[in-house]
Every structure is written in structure tokens, then in C-alpha cells.
Image: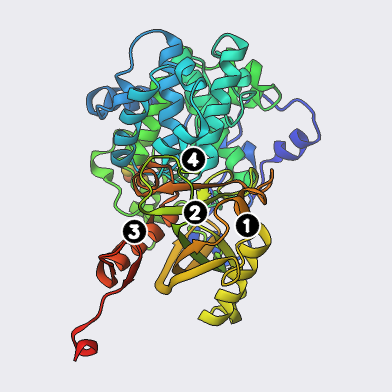
Amino acid sequence: MAKNPTAATTRRGRRPAMKATPQPRHPTPAAASSSSPSCVDIEDLAPAVPAAAPAALRAQLLRWYDAHRRDLPWRRASGSEEERAYAVWVSEVMLQQTRVPVVVGYYDRWMARWPTVRSLAAATQEDVNEVWAGLGYYRRARFLLEGAKQIVEKGEFPHTASALREVRGIGDYTAGAIASIAFNEVAPVVDGNVVRVISRLYAIADNPKESSTMKRFWLATLHSLLTTYKELEFILFCSWELVGQLVDPLRPGDFNQAMMELGATLCSKTKPGCSGCPVSSHCQALALSMENSSVQVTDYPRVVPKAKPRRDFAAVCVVQIAEGLGKEVTDTKDNGDIFLLIKRPEEGLLAGLWEFPLVLVDEGKTDSQNRRKAMDKYLTKLLNIDVGRKSDVILREDVGEHVHVFSHIRLTMYVELMIINLKDGVDQLSKKEDDRTKLKFANKSSVESMGLTSGIRKVYNMVQAFKEKTLCVSERGQVPTRKRNRRSKQ
Ligand code: SF4
């Protein structure tokens, strides 16, 4: 691909010519994928669109947004700028997790419980996990709480994107969204939807996952907010602080939301509604597809095959305590079904969340015997539950498998239920508890209301279904035994 002759000069740090030079079009996805990923210079972006385009594109997009925007609870947030900033913050973090219809319910529950950043700052991590449960990436919920505490400690909600980035868990995207939507700062916002729209508007075939491409997307978004290409060239030499003084100050928040809305609705991944698109006249991917029948707008951005997730295997043992547990250690008066839960370490995957005893096993050792051996070793080492010696195992049954897929890990969990009677009571467990291993006993209703991950929730539901189908409680007490089927009675 031909390079912008001014680009090399630019990289060496000299001031660029303020007059834009027309450039060849960006490569089609086919051309890009036929060799190594194409590398289009940042400087190439500006001349790719006629100079009058940004203002017209902005006006058309905003007109469409005013007429078609979805009525979403966080867009209804009124009150002070800070209240609006809090609403944008919570909603944007949730929207990074899942789709809008799912977020609406979570958002409403969250705001009903913590309507202000101050009320959130007073919450506990357990409470936050409980409301967040099912959304995944619990680290984000944790950062929301830590960020709220930080903001309350400081005394006010940061008003600028650069100040917002100082808050725990707020990155470029969220900072730009809060700053532009709540405080009207001209800061670009680039999420997956915007990447797709920009890729198509500018016919950029690069891999959007590469950081150099993302940088270009940021600039392209910013460019749409700008008035002239001269400004765009100029900002390549300016810091982000100076950029804020250059961009259109009128409706940056609405512009960002309009871009995201366009990507989320009309400019979808597989079925873009180009005939109803407000910016179709600016769309280079559409123009290319009309010129050349082998090109489709959905070729942009280039689809990059996902890396295969790592395959992990784990033995999970739902330990139910039948007898020997003092009421003083349970979290309710109900001493019926008491389950043992262990808190994960405060760092790493699912940090600080509660789960049933879980131990990773090698792929070649996932048979029942090896899993039980690994689990027994774990329970003895960490909790001093020496299965068979210090506890009576009333029942131990394999329940089934559940596969939970994280972004980078495919975890197969082999679930078993073990009902035990602790011979020496709970003392043997509490003696072993230290800073690294926190444990608790929870009855059925507590387990059902606490913030478990969706994988562990599934494990719990599997065990409950197994018990209902397979076990019965003897008339003499609470100790469950296997149901006898007809054949065994004969
Ligand atoms: S014309 Fe089609 S591909 Fe281009 S931005 Fe609009 S919806 Fe997306």
C-alpha cells in the first residue's frame, strides 16, 4: 500500500504540512488478509474522507439519534451532573458485560439499592457481589465499589476524562463516556460497536484487536468530532488535554452515544441496515461493496479468529454438614442443610468470591478415583477434614459435570456431593482457618441469596436437583439416604 509521504516525516517528530494530501483507498479485507495484517498509517485516515464530511456526518448522526434513540433507564437519569455521572458509570460498566436488555434489570436493581455514589461507597463487597451475581467479571463489581470509596474520600466526582482515569477500574472507555455524557467534555468513546462503525465508515480492514488499530479508531472518532482535517493533523502533535479544546463542544456525549447506538442497532455485525442508515453517504465500505460485488460491508472489520480457550479441569465437592456443627458458627438459626463454602484468594480469577471446595486436576486424572484423591488431600491440607478419620462420610455421590466458559478458560467441573458428620465438631475446621483460607457455613436460603458466580450457582442447582431426585430423609432424622428404587425392593 502506498504510504503518505508526510507520514515518515511525522514519525520523526517534525510538524506535518497542514494541507492534507489525497491518498489511495485503504485495502479491502481480501487484500489485507492475503498477507500479513495491513498497516495503515494514522496519517492516512484524514485524507480518506472529503473535508466537508465530519460536520455533515455529525449532524446526520445526531438527527437520527434524536429521533430513534432507545429509552433506557440510565438515559433518563436526571439530577445533578454527579448523579448523572454515577448512572453513566454503573451502566457503562454493566454494558461491558452483556447486552442492553439484560443490563436494564441489573441496573434497576443496583440503583434501587445504591442510588448514589455515596450509598455505594458504604456497601460491602458481599452485598455488591450479590447484586452483580450472574453478570460475570466480578473484578469490575469490585472496582465499582473501590472506585466509589475513592471518589467519596476525595469529596467529589472527577469531572474530566483524565481525572476519571485516576479512579480505580475506570479506563479510557469509561472515562470518555462519563466525561462526555455527564460533563459534556469532548472526549471520544470507543467500544466494540464504535469500532465496527468506524471500520465500515473508513473501510479499515485492520485487526481491531491490535493496539495500533485501536489508536487509529480513537483518532477517527475524534476526527468525526472535529471541524477540519487540519485540526486532526494538529492533534497528532498535541496531548489529550489540548485535544479537548479543539473538538466541537456542543454535544459530545450525544455524539458518542449516537455512534454506539448506531453500532448496536443498525450497523450490526452480520445484518447492517444500510438502507436506513443516517450516515450511509459517508460509508466507504458501502461504497466499495456497490462498486465491487465481491466486497461486502460485513467484511469490515476483518474477523480475527479467537484464540482457543485453555482447557482446565476441576473436582468440585459440595460438602454438606449433617451433624456436629454448632449453631453459633452458622449464619442462621436453621441448621438443616449446612454447606461449606470457601473464599477464593483476593487476587486473580474470581477474586474474593465464595465457592464450594474446588481443586484443579490434570486432564488425565479426571476419573472419579483420582478426583476424590485430590479432593481428600485438599480438604485435609486446607481444612483439616480428614475424610473417613475425622468425619463420618454418610454419603458421597458423583452428581455430574458442568462446563463453564470464561473468556480465556474452558473449565470442566466434575461435581460430587459429600454429606459428612464432623466427629470433633467445627473446632477442627476453625483451628485451621487463616488469612489465606476463609471459610463459612451457610444454610440453603443463604446459599440461594448470596452472590455466587453463575458456574458455582449451576453446581449448587445440579446438587439440589440430584438430591430431590435421588435422596430421601430418614424418618429418624435429617440424614439423607439414597431412595430405593422398585427393583431393589423386590
Ligand atoms: S451504511 Fe451500513 S455499513 Fe455503513 S455505517 Fe451505515 S449501517 Fe454501517
Name the amino acid type tagged 1.
Leu
Residue in the picture at 25% in, 30% down: 70
* Mark 1 in CB contact with mark 2 (< 8 angstroms): yes
Q: Earlier in the sequence, mark 4 or mark 2?
A: 4
Q: Residues within 10 Å of mark 4 (few under 14, many from 20)?
A: few
Q: Position of residue 216 (x, y in %)?
A: 59, 39
Residue at the limit of the structure toward the bottom, as seen here? 490
Q: Residues within 10 Å of mark 3 (few under 14, many from 20)?
A: few
Which mark, by number, is residue 461? 3
The residue tagged 1 is 383
Q: Is residue 250 visible?
A: no
- Mark 3 to mark 4 CA distance (whole Å): 27 Å
The residue tagged 4 is 328
Question: Which picture quadrant has residue 376?
Answer: bottom right
Nearer to us: label 2 or label 3: 2
- Mark 1 to mark 2 CA distance (whole Å): 10 Å
- The scheme the figure's colours follow is rainbow
* Mark 3 in CB contact with mark 4 (< 8 angstroms): no
Question: Which picture quadrant has residue 85?
Answer: top left
* Mark 1 in CB contact with mark 4 (< 8 angstroms): no
Nearer to us: label 1 or label 3: 1
* Mark 4 in CB contact with mark 2 (< 8 angstroms): no
Q: Earlier in the sequence, mark 1 or mark 2?
A: 2
Mark 2 C-beta to ligand 1 under 8 Å? no
Q: Residues within 10 Å of mark 1 (few under 14, many from 20)?
A: many
Q: Position of residue 298 (x, y in %)?
A: 38, 54
* Mark 1 in CB contact with mark 3 (< 8 angstroms): no
- Mark 1 to mark 3 CA distance (whole Å): 24 Å
Which mark, by number, is residue 324? none
Q: Is residue 301 visible?
A: yes
Residue at the limit of the structure toward the front, as seen here? 476
